[in-house]
Image (cartoon, rainbow, N blue to C red):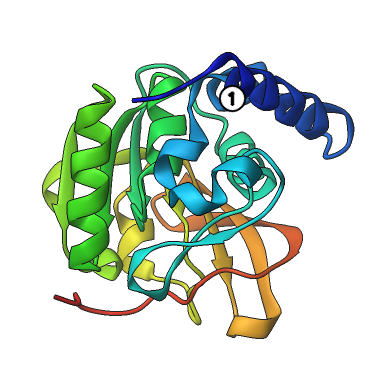
Amino acid sequence: MHDSFVHKGKRKNLVEYLRYKMGISDENVLSAINEVPRHLFIESIFEDYAYEDRAFPILAHQTISHPSTVAEQSELLQVKPGEKVLEIGTGCGYQTAVLLAMKALVYTVERQKDLFDFSKKKLREMHLYPKFQSFGDGFAGLPTFAPFDKIIVTCGAAVLPTELLKQLKVGGKMVIPLGPTDQQVLYRFTKISPTEIEKEEFGAYKFVPMLNNTNQ
């Protein structure tokens, strides 16, 4: 587990970039991004660029999101320490690690077996422990552990997964990119009452698609 002074310095620069160029102001988010060694979640050939605001390919034809996307989604969630957060799309585990650094109780689901295995091993190596890590269908969520204070979806869904809204507490928030692959928009849904949802829009993004079922 190699995390050098150079890596730490690059992380500090990334945090300054997120704060001053991207307008991220949640100190909990910035502190978590400063803490989590992103270079450990990507292939070593990309290590020198790990703290630039870039996405990189990971296993199963997926990508690790831009740090600015991770920061914005995390900020929109408004996570407080000790809150139960459901993450759909564990991926390589970087967003999971950021949420854990924000002191959330993380329940995470991944449908790609390669990524499930990779993230489970990687988080364990880093002594980071989600409350529950599952290989399964993100559209189904984790009803056994519901309700959740917050839900974050790290892949773009063509339609709103209503099953996830059901698993959100009243007062809870879900951050999710919606729409076709080339026209996704980032939304935040707040559950005002059991039947009433408030919707806010935060601009265009490009995420990998959210798919049903699982892939061995």
Locate residue 6, reporting x and y percent: 63, 21
Q: Residue furthest right?
A: 21
Locate residue 133, reporting x and y percent: 18, 44
Locate residue 85, reporting x and y percent: 36, 37
The residue depicted at 38 percent of the width and 58 percent of the height is 165
Would residue 88 be visible to someone looking at this image? Answer: yes
Q: Nearer the viewer, residue 186 or 62?
A: 62
Q: Which residue is mark 1?
A: 7
Q: Nearer the viewer, residue 140 or 120?
A: 120
Q: Quadrant of residue 54?
A: bottom right
* Residue 119 vertical position relative to residue 29 in the rendered view, above or below: below
The residue depicted at 43 percent of the width and 21 percent of the height is 101
Would residue 150 be visible to someone looking at this image? Answer: no
Q: Which amino acid type is shown beneath numbered disc 1?
A: His
The residue depicted at 57 percent of the width and 68 percent of the height is 207
* Count of numbered circles on the image: 1
* Residue 10 vertical position relative to residue 40 in the rendered view, above or below: above
Q: Nearer the viewer, residue 170 or 145?
A: 145
Q: Is residue 208 left or right of residue 104?
A: right
Q: Quadrant of residue 67?
A: top right
Q: Is residue 35 left or right of residue 71?
A: left
Dot 1: what SS? helix
